[in-house]
Image (cartoon, rainbow, N blue to C red):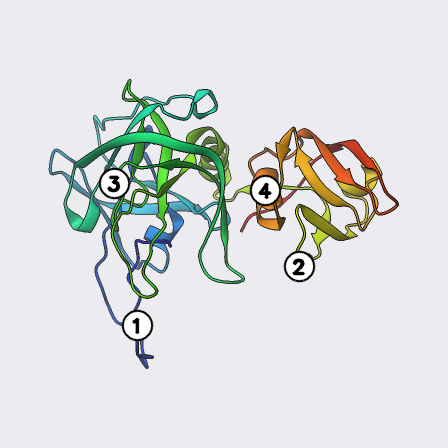
């Protein structure tokens, strides 16, 4: 479940209602702030409050709904930047700290460990999903923590807190120790593109998955002409079982893993072929606009 912008349940208003919601973020470089897309989605004005009580009206530089990231800019001096860590070096069991404003309670710090890595997570509504190759943590993350920093034991940013799992069937519940963060190494590429151009790109394998397939793996229904999968010789009807040695359980797992790479990357895709037998293919990923 995503959190950040409030949703109205049980009624269909005839017109938009003005509302106030809280999210979190951090200064990644210069005057640029990184947060979640769903925190600023549909916002008419974004006010940034720093821990030293300064407030700024922020400009939205760019958003990437597919990765649930947004970059803001404020006009201020002597802004405190966070040190950037390496999310690729993380191990399950490492200590982490989450900082944010859950329920509007500014500068709240919670701690825990990394519970899992490379966890496929989807957020959002059908047709407008964000796909995250997530860091899972049991550090308490609640509504309002969205976009906040997940730090390693040295105080370096290693993830962007973005989602929680919930046991409730309606509304928004609190933390049950299942929080998910976007790895900072994957977020940095999107951030750099948004700062440079206001837009971002996503990697493309060049396949359409068979959504009716219920077996293990991701079945390729058809190929996109002249894209990476076709050029590599992967036949339609194949079932992707692993990407770069990481097992693929289903279609979501395949999409999340592919989107963890930069466009132009060369990856190894292992498939069960429709004619029988397993085979690995080297595929160079294409590129497409994210927004």
Residue at (17% x, 49% y) in the render: 104
Distance of mark 2 from mark 4, alpha carbons?
Answer: 21 Å
| Mark 2 or 1, nearer chain start | 1
Distance of mark 4 from mark 3, alpha carbons?
Answer: 30 Å
Of all residues, the one furthest to the right in this rendering is 275
Q: Which residue is mark 1?
A: 9
| Mark 4 or 3, nearer chain start | 3
Distance of mark 1 from mark 4, alpha carbons?
Answer: 33 Å
Q: Which residue is mark 3?
A: 140
| Mark 2 or 4, nearer chain start | 4
Q: Nearer the viewer, mark 1 or mark 4?
A: 1
| Mark 3 or 2, nearer chain start | 3
| Mark 1 or 4, nearer chain start | 1
Left or right side of 83 for 54:
left
Q: Nearer the viewer, residue 198 or 200?
A: 200
Residue at (66% x, 59% y) in the render: 211
Distance of mark 2 from mark 1, alpha carbons?
Answer: 30 Å
Left or right side of 244 for 277:
right
Q: Which residue is mark 2?
A: 211
Q: Which residue is mark 4?
A: 202
């Amino acid at each position: 479940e995503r959190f950040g912008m409030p949703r109205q349940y049980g009624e269909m208003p005839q017109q938009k209602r003005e509302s106030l919601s809280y999210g979190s973020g951090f200064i990644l470089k210069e005057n640029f702030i990184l947060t979640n897309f769903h925190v600023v989605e549909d916002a008419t004005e974004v006010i940034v409050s720093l821990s030293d009580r300064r407030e700024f009206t922020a400009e939205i530089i760019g958003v990437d709904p597919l990765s649930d990231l947004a970059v803001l800019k404020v006009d201020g001096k002597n802004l405190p930047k966070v040190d950037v860590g390496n999310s690729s070096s993380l191990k399950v069991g490492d200590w982490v700290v989450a900082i944010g404003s859950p329920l509007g309670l500014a500068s709240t710090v919670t701690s825990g460990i990394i519970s899992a890595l490379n966890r496929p997570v989807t957020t959002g509504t059908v047709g407008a999903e964000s796909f995250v190759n997530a860091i899972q943590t049991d550090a308490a993350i609640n509504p309002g923590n969205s976009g906040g920093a997940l730090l390693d034991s040295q105080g370096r940013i290693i993830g962007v807190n973005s989602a929680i799992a919930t046991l409730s069937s309606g509304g928004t519940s609190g933390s049950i120790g299942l929080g998910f963060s976007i790895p900072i190494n994957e977020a940095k590429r999107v951030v750099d593109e948004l700062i440079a151009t206001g837009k971002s790109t996503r990697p493309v394998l060049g396949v359409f998955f068979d959504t009716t397939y219920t077996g293990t793996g991701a079945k390729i229904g058809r190929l996109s002409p002249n894209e990476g999968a076709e050029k590599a010789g992967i036949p339609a009807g194949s079932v992707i079982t692993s990407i770069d040695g990481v097992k693929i359980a289903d279609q979501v797992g395949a999409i999340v893993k592919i989107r963890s790479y930069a466009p132009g990357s060369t990856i190894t895709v292992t498939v069960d072929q429709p004619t029988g037998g397993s085979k690995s293919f080297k595929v160079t990923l294409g590129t497409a606009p994210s927004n």
